[in-house]
Image (cartoon, rainbow, N blue to C red):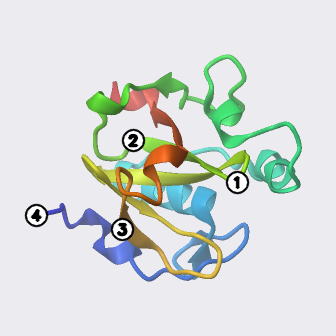
């Protein structure tokens, strides 16, 4: 049975650059969950994310990467077999690495996409398995 912390995030509507219960995009959902559940205030990387959405050379995994990170204490890359709840996942959509979600338990993650509400999905399933490009852990959780 999955943990219950994520229940209050299910059905949050999608909203570009949103970061609260009224609406979120995938990066905003990550910020909201970290603030509400872990007491961690992630910096607003809106400018970086806007550039990603405009298909610049900046991708979400480069924002999370320890060498190029602009979002603070998030650059701990984690092997997939060591994933834990609250780790951040980065996915490729098309050719760009622009989608993120939050691990709820091994194999499952909370995320939101344009045109949908926040939901739980299987990151090892057919839709996401080959799109997963990175797993990251906030340094305060190491």
Q: Which residue is label 2 attached to?
A: 87
- Whole-angstrom CA distance, mark 4 to mark 3, is 13 Å
Give the alpha-carbon distance from disc 1 to disc 4, as whole Å. Answer: 32 Å
Q: Mark 4 near mark 2, Cβ–Cβ under 8 Å?
A: no
Q: Mark 4 or 2 closer to N-term?
A: 4
Q: Earlier in the sequence, mark 3 or mark 2?
A: 2
Disc 1 target residue = 94
**Number of other residues with Cα within 10 Å of mark 2, as a class: few under 14, some 14 to 19, many 20 or more:** many
Tell me how far mark 3 sits from mark 1, CA to CA.
21 Å
Q: Nearer the viewer, mark 3 or mark 2?
A: 3
Residue that protrudes farthest toward the front in the picture: 126
| Mark sitting on residue 120 | 3
Q: Nearer the viewer, mark 3 or mark 1?
A: 1
Which quadrant of the rendered structure holds the N terminus?
bottom left
Q: Is residue 134 above or below residue 126?
A: above
Front position in the image: 59 or 11: 59
Which residue is under mark 4?
1
Give the position of the C terminus as an image quadrant.
top left
Of the two numbered discs 1 and 4 on the same chain, state the one appearing first in sequence: 4
């Amino acid at each position: 049975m999955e943990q219950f912390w994520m229940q209050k995030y299910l059905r949050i509507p999608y909203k570009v650059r949103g970061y609260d219960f009224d609406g979120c995009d995938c990066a905003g959902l990550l910020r909201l969950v970290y603030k509400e559940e872990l007491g961690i205030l992630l910096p607003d990387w809106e400018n970086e994310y806007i550039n990603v959405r405009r298909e610049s050379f900046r991708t979400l995994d480069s924002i999370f990467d320890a060498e190029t990170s602009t979002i603070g204490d998030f650059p701990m890359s984690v092997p997939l077999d060591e994933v834990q709840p609250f780790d951040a996942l980065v996915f490729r959509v098309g050719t760009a690495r622009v989608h993120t979600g939050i691990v709820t338990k091994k194999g499952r993650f909370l995320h939101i996409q344009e045109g949908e509400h926040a939901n739980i999905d299987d990151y090892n399933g057919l839709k996401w398995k080959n799109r997963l490009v990175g797993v990251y852990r906030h340094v305060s959780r190491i």
